[in-house]
Image (tube, coloured by chain):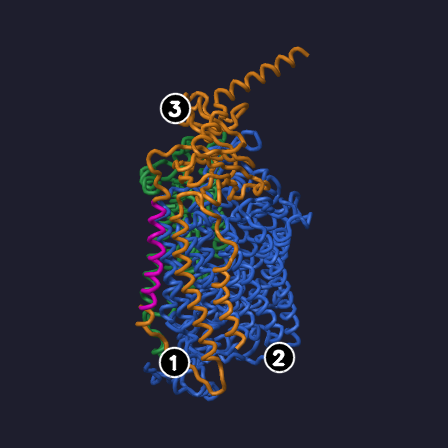
Chain colours: A orange, B blue, C green
Amino acid sequence: MAVVLILVIVAVGSVVFHLFSPWWWTPIASNWNYIDNTIIITFWITGFVFVAVVLFVAYCVLRFRHRPGNRAAYEPENKKLEVWLASVTSIGVAAMLAPGLFVWHQFVTVPPGTTEVEVVGQQWLWSFRLPGADGKLGTSDTRAIGDGNALGVNPNDTNGLDDLIIEGGELHLLVGKPVKMLLRSVDVLHDFYVPEFRAKMDMIPGMETYFWFTPTRTGTFEVLCAELCGTGHPQMRGTVVVDNEADYQTWLQEQQTFTQLLAARQEQTTIASSTSSSK
Amino acid sequence: MVDIRSDASAAIPPAEVEDVELYHPRSWWTKYVFSQDAKIIAIQYSMTAIAIGMVALVLSWLMRLQLGFPGTFDFIDADHYYQFITMHGMIMVIYLLTALFLGGFGNYLIPLMVGARDMVFPYANMLSYWLYLLAVLVLAAGFFAPGGPTGAGWTLYPPQAILSGTPGGKDWGILLMLSSLILFIIGFTMGGLNYVVTVLQGRARGMTLMRMPLTIWGIFTATIMALLAFPALFVAAVMMLFDRLLGTSFFMPAIVEMGEQLKQGGGSPILFQHLFWFFGHPEVYIVALPAFGIVSDLISTHARKNIFGYRMMVWAIVIIGALSFIVWAHHMYVSGMNPKFGFFFATTTLIIAVPTAIKVYNWVLTLWRGDIHLSLPMLFALAFIVTFVNGGLTGLFLGNVVVDVPLSDTMFVVAHFHMVMGVAPIMVIFGAIYHWYPKVTGRMLNEAMGQIHFWVTFLGAYLIFFPMHYLGLLGIPRRYHDLGEAAFVPESAHTLNAFISVMALTVGAAQILFLFNLVWSLKKGREAGGNPWRATTLEWQTPQTPPAHGNWGKELPVVYRWAYDYSVPGAAEDFIPQNQPGLGGPTREAAS
Amino acid sequence: MSVMLLFLAAIAAIIIWWMAQQRLTSRPWLEVGRLGQPGGGERSQIPPAKIGLYVFLGVVGALFSLFISAYLMRVGTPDWWSTPIPRLLWLNTAMLIVSSAAMQWAKTEAERGRDDTMRTALLAALATAILFLTGQVFAWRELTEAGYVLADNPANSFFYVITGMHGLHILGGLVALGRTTVKAWSAPASRSLRLSVDLCAVYWHFMLAVWLILFALFAGWANDFADLCRQLLT
C-alpha cells in the first residue's frame, strides 16, 4: 500500500511542483517566444503521459498485488492494443516535432535587413565588433592577432578599418532591430548565452557560427559562457544592454574604430621606443 | 483465448553437442584470479566496476558540496571541481555502467541463460577483464599524476582538452585518460566478441532466438552496437593523442592561447565532436538496452505473468539499436554544425521515442492483471519505470532541435541524462543484483536493509534530479564551479541547490548500506535454494547453486519453451521452466 | 561520416539478411516443445572461431571506415597539401597481394591435405608479409627524409596515422600467422591447424582489401568520391 501511495504522490507531486515552482524561465527579451510556446506544448504532452503511466502503475499495484490464491492472467500479446498505442504515440510525437521544426526553420533563416554584430570569445573574455559607417564587417583571421589587434581583424581589408572594436566591454543593441550575431573564438569552444534571449550557439575556433534574434525590450542583460572553456569558465561574463534609438546612438559615438585603435597603439610604441632609446 | 500446443511435449533426446573444450583450472591462481570461467570473470568485472564506481560516487559528493555550499570548502577549487566532474562522468558512463552491464551481467548471464557451459573464447574473455582492470588503474593513476586528472569534461572536447587553460591539459591527465580509453576499448572488443559469438553459437538445443529471455536480447544487441560504436572513440582518442604529443592538427585550428600563437592550425574541433558522439549516442543505448532487457525479465518474473508483447519487445530492441546510430548529432544542435542537419536529426531522434514508448507500455501492461509480488527486484523495476519515463520524456524536449537551444548546456541537460541513463539503469542494476545475488552466492540479500536502501535511493534520486530540471529551465548553465553573482538567478535557487546536495549525500550514504548488505549476506543471508523466485529461465535450473564450473553437470539442458511461461492455464505451478517439456510439476518431469 | 554510414548500411544489410532467417515473427508461446526448424533458429555449422573472426573484421572495418570518414572531412581544407606516394608503395602493394595469394594457396593445400606444400605456402605468406611491413617502414623513412614530416601538414598526419594503424593490424596478424606456421612445421596437420590457416587467410584477404582502399585514397583516386561526399554533407 505504501508503494501505491508513494507512486501517486510522485505523480501528483511532480505536477504540483511544476505548477507552483518559483523556478521558471526568465522573462523573455527577444522574439523567440515561439520557442517558449513549443516548450509549453511539450510540457503538456509529456506531463500527461508521465502522470498517466505512473498512475496506471499505481493502480496495477493496488489492484493486482499478490494475495494468496491469486493467479495472473495469461495474455502473450494484444496486437490491436499495441497498434493503437503506437499510433497515439506517433501522433503525440508529431505534435511536438512539427512546431519544433517549423520554429527551427525560422531560427536558422536570417531575415533580410539584419545588422551584423561580431562576438569574439577568448579565455575568459567577451569582445565585440560592429560594422562601421560602411555597414560591413572586415574579414578576420586568428593568425592576424597581435599587438593592438586583439580580434585579428585583417588590416588590409578596407571594410574593416572603420569597424568598431569593443574589447571586453559592454555590447549595446538597438531594441526592435533584428541582429545577426556572428560568433568567433580565438582559442577554445565558448558559447554566447543570454538566458533572456533564449538563443545560443557555440563558438568554434577556426570557423564562424551565427544566430539571429530581435531584442524586444530595453534593459541590461548578463552574458554567460555555456560551453566549458577551462578553469575560468564560470567567470566569463559580459553585459548586453538593449537601448532605444537615442541611447544607442550616444553609445555608438563613444566607440573606437579599428584605425583609431591601431593609431593609438602605434603612438604608444613610438613613445615607448623613444623613452627606451633616450635611456 | 490462446491455444497452447502441448502435444509436442514428448521428451527430446539430449543434444548431441560435441564436448566443448572446457578449460579446467589447475591451481588456486587459475581458479580465482586468472580464471577463464565466465562466472568468475563476471564477479571480477562487477567488483572492479563497483569499486571505481564508489570513487565516482565520492567525486559526486565533492561536486555537490561545492555546488550546494559554494565557498565553504576551500580545497574544492575550480581546477579540482572540473577534474571531479570529468572523472565522475567518464567513470560512471564507461567504467561503471558499460563494464557492469556487459562485462558483469553479460558474462554471468549469457552462458547460463542460453544454456552454454562457458563463453566460446574463455582465454580472450580473461584477457578482456585484465585489460579492463589495467584501464581502470591507468585512469585512477590520473589522481596521483603531476597536474592531476584531466578536467576537460567527460566529452573531452578539443582544443580545450589539450590546452593549458584546462587542468591536466598540458600535464599527464589527458594522456592517461586517452590511454585508459584505448585500453578499455581493446579489452571490451575481446569481451564483446565473446558475448556475440556465444549467443550465436553457444545456445543450448532448442534455444531459438525467439525463446531467448529479453535480458539476452538486450545485452546481445548492446554488444553489437558497442563493437561498432567504440571504434569511433578509439579513432578520436588516437588522433587527439597525436595532436597532444606530436603536434599534428587533426582537431587543432589556428589558436591564440593566452596571447601566444600556437603552431598548429587548420584542424576541426567539430570533427572530434562528430566522432565522439557517433560513439556517445549509441553508448546511451549500450547502457539502456541491457537495462531494458533485464527489467523486462524482472517484471515478468515478479508479476508472475509473461512479458506482454514479447515479439514487439524484441523488434523494439533491434530497431532502437539501429536507429541510435543515426541520431548522434542531436548532441550538437548548438555546436555550430550545418543547421540543416537539425531537421534530420530532430526527426530521427523523435522517431526513436516510438519504439521506446512501446516498451514502456508493454512493461506496464505486463503488470495489468498480474500477480504482483512486491519483492525488492520488483520495487526497483517500478522505480525504473517511473524514472525512465520521466527522463525519457524530458529527452523529447532536448531532442526537438529548437527546444534544445535554450535548454542545452544548462542544468536541464544534467538532470535529464542523470535521470534517464544514470538513475534508471542503476535502478535496474540494483534490481538485478537483488534478483541474481541468490544465484551467485546461494544466499538472499537482507530484506530490511534492502527496503531502506530502495526507498532512500529511489525517492532521494528523484528529489535530486526532478527539481534540477527547473534550475536549467531558469537558465543556470551546467559545469559552473561557482555560479557567483547572476542577476537572473533568485536566492531561492541557491536554497534548492543546497537541498539537492543534502539529498545527494543521503542517497550516497544509502549505497554504503547496500555494499554492507552485499558483504553481510554473503555469510549471514538466508539460504536461497536453487530457484527462490520460481523463475523459468535456464540459470535457475542449474544442478548446483552457485553453478559449478561448466554450469550444467553432465548434460546440457534442452529447451522446450520460451522464457515466459508464467501462470499458464492448466499448468500445475504458476511457472514452467524452459527446460521442462510438459505442463506438470517440475519434479515429475526432471525424473523422466 | 558518409563512409561510416555506408559501412553501417552494409553491416545492417548483413544483419537483416541473417535475421530474416531467424523466424523473428514466430509466436514462441505457441511453439512449446518444438525445436526450431533446421537452418532457422538453430545455430549454424560454421565454427565459432570463424564467426568470431567475422565479427572482429566488422570492428576493424568500422575502425578504418571512421578513419577514412575523418580523412574525407578534413581533405581539401586550405592548408592541405597532398603527400606524394613513394614509389616503394607499389612494390609493397604487390608484396601484400602475393602474401594474400600465398595464404589462399596454403588454405587450398590444407583442405586437400597436402601438408608439405601448405607449409611452403605459409612460409611464403609470412615472408612476403614481413617484406610488406619492412617496405612500409622504408616508405615512411623516404617520406620523412624528403621533408614530409608528421606534424607539418594534415595530409602527412593522416598518411602516417592510417598506414601505421594498418601496419599494426598486419603485425597482429603476423603473430597469429607465425604461431600457425610454427605449429604447421612441428606437427602433422590437424583439424584445428586447418582452421587456423583458414582464419589467417580470411584475415589476410581482408587486410589486403583495406590496404587497396587506403592506397586508392592516398593516391587521390578517391578524390571524386570525396567531392561527392562533401557535396552531400556540407
C-alpha separation, residue under disc 3 versus residue under disc 2: 84 Å
Which range is magenta? A84-105
Q: Give the residue displayed 66% in from the left and 72% down from the top.
A: B520
Q: Give the residue displayed 45% in from the left and 67% down from the top.
A: B293
Residue at which label 1 appears: A74
Residue at which label 3 appears: A134
Q: What residue type is labelled 2?
A: Arg
Determine whether, in the image, residue B503 is placed left or right of residue A215: right
Q: In this rendered view, identify the residue nearer to me: A209 or B462.
A: B462
Q: What residue type is labelled 3?
A: Asp
> Is the residue marked by circle 2 packed among few (<14), some (14-19), or many (20+) residues within 10 Å?
some
Q: Give the residue displayed 50% in from the left and 65% down from the top.
A: A13
Q: In this rendered view, identify the residue nearer to me: B179 or B343.
A: B343
Callout 3: chain? A
Q: Which amino acid does label 1 sit on?
A: Tyr
Residue at which label 2 appears: B526
